Image (cartoon, grey):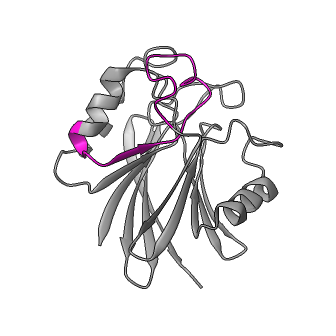
């Protein structure tokens, strides 16, 4: 089993002061094997914090990574294979139509030839299965606002990749100052 932290749209310090303390307590170094980040890291200190949780960090470039301290460090997309499961990672700000359009994301997953597509940009958690593939948008770990989601709920996903290949996604959301956890499963057909 591989444990992956999936997060994104951080926007520190432009749109949020920090990752919520209740989330920081959960993100302990040495427990997480890998981090997949949908971008908008925007500062070196946050990137270093992620690397302190796990040295294996993959980040796709978000629209605000293009002009900040982390500019051009990250590719526009990442494709990786973990235990026979192919995973694609994109922010999604360049997709047309954007904003989590299901058909656009399905076409992106086909183009990248992945079983799981992790996307960002909307600042809103979503997870669903479409056309035999699994789609996850972890939302914004800081709850950073966006024009499409002015009252974003802070969220991230811990994803267990198991043999089979299968995924168990644990969704963490900060609702009314309490951490709420939901569980979602996906098995590649």
Answer left or right for 29 relative to 107: left
Q: Which image quadrant for residue 146?
A: top right
Q: Which image quadrant for residue 167?
A: bottom left
The residue at the point 49 percent across, 35 percent down is 74
The residue at the point 27 percent across, 38 percent down is 51
User: Do we see residue 34 in this rendering?
Assistant: yes
Question: Where 99 falls versus 151 (above or below)?
Answer: below
Question: Where 154 falls versus 63 (above or below)?
Answer: below
- List x then y, in percent, for residue 188: 55, 80
The residue stretch that appears in magenta? 52-74
Answer left or right for 173 relative to 137: left
Depth check, front residue: 47 or 101: 47
Could you tell me how many numbered marks the image carries?
Answer: 0
Magenta region, main secondary structure: loop
Which image quarter holds the N terminus? bottom left
- List x then y, in percent, for residue 15: 52, 17
The residue at the point 23 percent across, 42 percent down is 53
Answer left or right for 113 relative to 97: left
- List x then y, in percent, for residue 108: 71, 57
The residue at the point 72 percent across, 30 percent down is 148
Residue 165 within the magenta-colored segment of the rendering: no
Q: Residue furthest left?
A: 30
Answer left or right for 143 relative to 53: right
Which image quarter holds the C terminus? bottom right
């Amino acid at each position: 089993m591989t444990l992956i932290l999936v997060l994104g749209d951080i926007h520190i310090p432009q749109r949020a002061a920090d990752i919520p303390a209740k989330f920081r307590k959960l993100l302990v170094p040495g427990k997480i094997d890998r981090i997949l980040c949908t971008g908008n890291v925007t500062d070196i200190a946050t990137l270093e914090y992620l690397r302190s949780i796990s040295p294996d960090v993959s980040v796709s470039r978000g629209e605000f990574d293009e002009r900040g301290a982390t500019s051009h460090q990250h590719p526009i997309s990442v494709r990786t294979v973990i235990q026979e499961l192919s995973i694609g990672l994109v922010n999604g700000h360049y997709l047309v139509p954007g904003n989590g359009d299901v058909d656009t994301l399905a076409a992106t997953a086909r183009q990248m030839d992945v079983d799981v597509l992790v996307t960002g940009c909307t600042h809103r958690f979503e997870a669903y299965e479409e056309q035999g593939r699994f789609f996850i948008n972890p939302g914004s770990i800081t709850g950073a606002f966006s024009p499409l989601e002015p009252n974003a709920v802070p969220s991230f996903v811990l994803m267990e990749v198991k043999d089979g290949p299968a995924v168990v996604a644990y969704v963490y959301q900060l609702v009314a100052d309490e951490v709420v956890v939901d569980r979602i499963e996906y098995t590649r057909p």
